[in-house]
Image (spheres, rainbow, N blue to C red):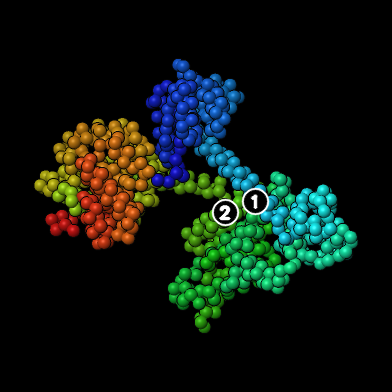
C-alpha cells in the first residue's frame, strides 16, 4: 500500500460518532486514515509517546478535557503536530484563546468542505516543515564533509561575498603567500589579481552576478603577496557558506595534465550525439539559475521540446535514421537559439532550453517561433525528406520555483498536454491553474456519470472464476463499463475516480446490483445455479442504508442470497474497519457471502481476517503477475492459501495470464483462478465450467 495519502490522526473527542464523521469526510476525499481516539490527558500522553501522528483534531470542550488542555499536552511533548479545534456550529469565536496558545485553526463540525481544505493545507505545511528539517540536517552533514574536503584539497578554494573573502583553504593561502585565514578575511578578491586584469575581472563578476553570461571560468594573472605574478584559471559557482549566499572560486592544481583535463571537462558537459549540452550539465546550470530566481535576482522559463514523430522515424527507418533526425534538429536549434538561452539534449527526442531574463509574452513568442522552425524544416534521411513537428511544455522560473526536479516535471506535464492536443503545439504549465482545470474536469465527469445513470449508459461484463480445488459450479466476477454518447466503452480507471470524487459511487454500485439481481433471478428461474462476485466501493461500505436496501431486493426478487458474493478491497476494509466489520456481519446474517480482494501486500496482512469473517480472499495481482518466475511470490501465495484453508476461507488468484502460472497456482493449492488466460470479460455468462481448465 502506498503511504502517499496515508494520514495518521489523533482525535480528542468524548463521542466516537463525532470523530467518525470527520474521519469519513477525509476518507471520502481520498485519504487513507489511521485513527487513534483519546478522551483525556493520560490517553493522549500515551498516544503521542507510542505512535507517529500527522494531525490532531480536538473538540473545543468535553466533560473532563478540552482542546486547550490537549494543546498543553502537545506543547509539553514539543512535537510539531498541527492541532485543529472543532467547535459546535457558530461557536468558532469561543476558540480564540486556543488559537492564541498555538492551535493551527478552528472549524465548526458542520463545515465539512472548509475542514477538508484546512487539513490539506496543514498536512502540506507539515510535510514542508519535515522536509525542511531533513534538508537542514543533510545540509549540516554535507557542509561538514565539504569543509573537510575543501581543507584537504590540493586545489586552491575560496569563498567571496560582495567581492570580499569570507573563507579560503590552505592551498589558496599558500598559493598567494599567506599563512593564516585571518590574513585574507575581508580582503577584496581584486587584491589577488594583477592590476592589468582588474577591468576584465570586474566585467566578468558583473555579468556573472546578473546571470547574463554562461561562462564560469576566467583566466587572469594571480598576484602573490610578494607581488610576483603567475597565470591562473578561476572557476566560479554559486555557493553558501555558513548560511550566507556567496560565490565559490576554485583554482585548479596545475600539476595535472591541462589538455586531458580540458577534454574531460568538455566530454562531461556535452551530449556526444548532438554536440549540445547534456542532461547532467543542464540540470546543474538550471539549479544555479533557480537559486538566483528564488532569491528574486532573476526570472526566466524552462522550455521542454519533444519531437512528435521520432518513434515513427525510428520504426520505419531504423536507429541510424532517428539519430540523424536528432542531430539535424539539434543543429537547427543550436543555430537559431544560441543567443536566446542554454540549449541541451535532455533525453531521447527531448531538448530543453533555459531562457533567462524573459517574461511570459517573450517566452511564448520564442516557443511559437520554435514550433514554426521545426515544422517547416525537412531532414534528409536516406535520400528522403522527413518532416516532423514538436510538442512543447514550458514553465516559468521565479521565486516560487522549488528545485530543478519540480521545474522539469512541470514543463514535462505541459509537454504531455500539448501532445494530447495533437502535437505541434505548446502549453504553459501553471500549477494553480492546472489544479482548477482538474476540478473543472471532475465537474464535467460528474455530470456525465449522472446522465449515464439516468439513461442506463453502463454495461455489465462477466469474467469466469474457475475452480481448481474449490467448490464446483458457475462463478463470475461482475465488471462495469461506461458508454459514451457514441456507444464506445469507457474503462473504469477513467470514470470511477471521478464518480468517487463526485460522491456518486454508491449510486453506481446500486445500479450494478439491481441489474445483476435481475439477471441472476432469471438464471435461477431457468434452473442455472450461478454465483456472482460484486465489488463494493468505499461509499457503499459506509452506507448505513445498504443492508436494509439489499434485504428488500433479495426478498422481492426471491433471490438465493448464497449466490451473491460482495467484494471489498483489503485496503478499503482496513481504512473503514468499523464499517467493514458491520457490513460483513450484516451480509452474513442475510446469508450472502463476502470476499476480500487485493490481499497479501499489507505488512500485517492476516490481521484483517481476524476482524472480517469473509468466505473468500482474492490474492493481490502484484503477487500473481510473473508468478512462474518469482520464487518469493510463489512462497507467499502458498502461505496465504495454507492460512486461508486453515480458516475455512477459499482463495482466488485473478489476473492469470499464462499456463505456467496456472501450474504454480495448482501446486500452491489455490482454490479458484480468474484471468484472460481463461476468458476475457464478456456480456454473456457462457463459460463452460464442466470442461474446466
Residue displayed at 35% across by 50% down: 492
Image x and y of residue 418, in percent = 52, 59
- Residue beneath the point at 29% across and 32% down: 582
In primary-sequence order, the first of circles 1 and 2 is: 1
Q: Residue at x 46, y 44 (%)?
A: 4
Q: Quadrant of the C terminus?
A: bottom left
Q: Where does the image place residue 607, in percent across and percent down from the top left?
A: 32, 38
Quadrant including the N terminus: top left
- The residue labelled by disc 1 is 145
Q: CA distance from mark 1 to mark 2?
A: 24 Å
Q: From the viewer's perspective, is 162 left or right of 30?
A: right
In-image side of 105 versus 593 (left or right): right
Q: At which x and y percent is residue 474? A: 16, 50
Q: Is residue 328 left or right of residue 606?
A: right
> Cβ–Cβ below 8 Å for labels 1 and 2?
no
549 and 102: which is toward the camera = 102
**Residue furthest top as drawn:** 63
Q: Which residue is mark 2?
A: 405
Amino acid at each position: 500500500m502506498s503511504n502517499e495519502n496515508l494520514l495518521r490522526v489523533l482525535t480528542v473527542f468524548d463521542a466516537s460518532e463525532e470523530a467518525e464523521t470527520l474521519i469519513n469526510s477525509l476518507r471520502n476525499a481520498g485519504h487513507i486514515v489511521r485513527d487513534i481516539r483519546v478522551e483525556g490527558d493520560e490517553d493522549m500522553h500515551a498516544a503521542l509517546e507510542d505512535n507517529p501522528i500527522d494531525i490532531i483534531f480536538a473538540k473545543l470542550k468535553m466533560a473532563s478535557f478540552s482542546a486547550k488542555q490537549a494543546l498543553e499536552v502537545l506543547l509539553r511533548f514539543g512535537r510539531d503536530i498541527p492541532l485543529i479545534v472543532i467547535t459546535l456550529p457558530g461557536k468558532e469565536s469561543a476558540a480564540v484563546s486556543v488559537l492564541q496558545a498555538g492551535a493551527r485553526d478552528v472549524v465548526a463540525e458542520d463545515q465539512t468542505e472548509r475542514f477538508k481544505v484546512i487539513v490539506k493545507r496543514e498536512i502540506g505545511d507539515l510535510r514542508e516543515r519535515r522536509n525542511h528539517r531533513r534538508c537542514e540536517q543533510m545540509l549540516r552533514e554535507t557542509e561538514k564533509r565539504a569543509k573537510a574536503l575543501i581543507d584537504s584539497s590540493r586545489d586552491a578554494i575560496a569563498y567571496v561575498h560582495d567581492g570580499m573573502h569570507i573563507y579560503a583553504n590552505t592551498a589558496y593561502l599558500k598559493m598567494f603567500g599567506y599563512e593564516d585565514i585571518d590574513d585574507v578575511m575581508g580582503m577584496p578578491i581584486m587584491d589577488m589579481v594583477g592590476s592589468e586584469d582588474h577591468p576584465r575581472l570586474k566585467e566578468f563578476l558583473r555579468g556573472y552576478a546578473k546571470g547574463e553570461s554562461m561562462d564560469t571560468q576566467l583566466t587572469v594573472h594571480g598576484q602573490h603577496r610578494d607581488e610576483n605574478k603567475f597565470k591562473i584559471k578561476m572557476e566560479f559557482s554559486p555557493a553558501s557558506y555558513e548560511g550566507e549566499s556567496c560565490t565559490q572560486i576554485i583554482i585548479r592544481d596545475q600539476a595535472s595534465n591541462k589538455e586531458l583535463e580540458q577534454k574531460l571537462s568538455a566530454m562531461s558537459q556535452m551530449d556526444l550525439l548532438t554536440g549540445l549540452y547534456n542532461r547532467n550539465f543542464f540540470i546543474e546550470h538550471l539549479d544555479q539559475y533557480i537559486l538566483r530566481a528564488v532569491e528574486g535576482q532573476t526570472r526566466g522559463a524552462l522550455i521542454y521540446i519533444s519531437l512528435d514523430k521520432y518513434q515513427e522515424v525510428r520504426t520505419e527507418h531504423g536507429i541510424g535514421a532517428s539519430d540523424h533526425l536528432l542531430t539535424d534538429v539539434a543543429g537547427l536549434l543550436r543555430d537559431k537559439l544560441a543567443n536566446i538561452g542554454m540549449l541541451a539534449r535532455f533525453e531521447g527526442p527531448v531538448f530543453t532550453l533555459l531562457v533567462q531574463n524573459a517574461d511570459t509574452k517573450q517566452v511564448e513568442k520564442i516557443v511559437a517561433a520554435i514550433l514554426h522552425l521545426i515544422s517547416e524544416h525537412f531532414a534528409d534521411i536516406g535520400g528522403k525528406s522527413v518532416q516532423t513537428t514538436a510538442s512543447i511544455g514550458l514553465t516559468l522560473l521565479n521565486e516560487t520555483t522549488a528545485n530543478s526536479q519540480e521545474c522539469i516535471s512541470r514543463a514535462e506535464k505541459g509537454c504531455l498536454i500539448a501532445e494530447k492536443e495533437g502535437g505541434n503545439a505548446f502549453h504553459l504549465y501553471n500549477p494553480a491553474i492546472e489544479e482548477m482545470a482538474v476540478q473543472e474536469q471532475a465537474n464535467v465527469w460528474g455530470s456525465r456519470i449522472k446522465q449515464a445513470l439516468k439513461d442506463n449508459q453502463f454495461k455489465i461484463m462477466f469474467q469466469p472464476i474457475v475452480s481448481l480445488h474449490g467448490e464446483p459450479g458457475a462463478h463470475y466476477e461482475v465488471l462495469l463499463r461506461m458508454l459514451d454518447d457514441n456507444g464506445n466503452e469507457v474503462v473504469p480507471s477513467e470514470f470511477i475516480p471521478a464518480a468517487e470524487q463526485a460522491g456518486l459511487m454508491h449510486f453506481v454500485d446500486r445500479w450494478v446490483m439491481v441489474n445483476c439481481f435481475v439477471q441472476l433471478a432469471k438464471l435461477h428461474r431457468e434452473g442455472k445455479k450461478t454465483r456472482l462476485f460484486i465489488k463494493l466501493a468505499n461509499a457503499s461500505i459506509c452506507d448505513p442504508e445498504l443492508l436494509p436496501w439489499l434485504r428488500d431486493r433479495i426478498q422481492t426478487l426471491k433471490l438465493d442470497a448464497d449466490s451473491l458474493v460482495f467484494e471489498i478491497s483489503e485496503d478499503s476494509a482496513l481504512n473503514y474497519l468499523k464499517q467493514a466489520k458491520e457490513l460483513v456481519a450484516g451480509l452474513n446474517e442475510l446469508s450472502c457471502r463476502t470476499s476480500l480482494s487485493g490481499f497479501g501486500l499489507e505488512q500485517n496482512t492476516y490481521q484483517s481476517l481476524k476482524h472480517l469473517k469473509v468466505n473468500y480472499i482474492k490474492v493481490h495481482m502484484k503477487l500473481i503477475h510473473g508468478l512462474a518466475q518469482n520464487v518469493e511470490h510463489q512462497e507467499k501465495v502458498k502461505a496465504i492459501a495454507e492460512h486461508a484453508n486453515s480458516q475455512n476461507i477459499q482463495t482466488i488468484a485473478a489476473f492469470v495470464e499464462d499456463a505456467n502460472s496456472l501450474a504454480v497456482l495448482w501446486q500452491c493449492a489455490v482454490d479458484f483462478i480468474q484471468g484472460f488466460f481463461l476468458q476475457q470479460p464478456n456480456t454473456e455468462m457462457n463459460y463452460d465450467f464442466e470442461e474446466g481448465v
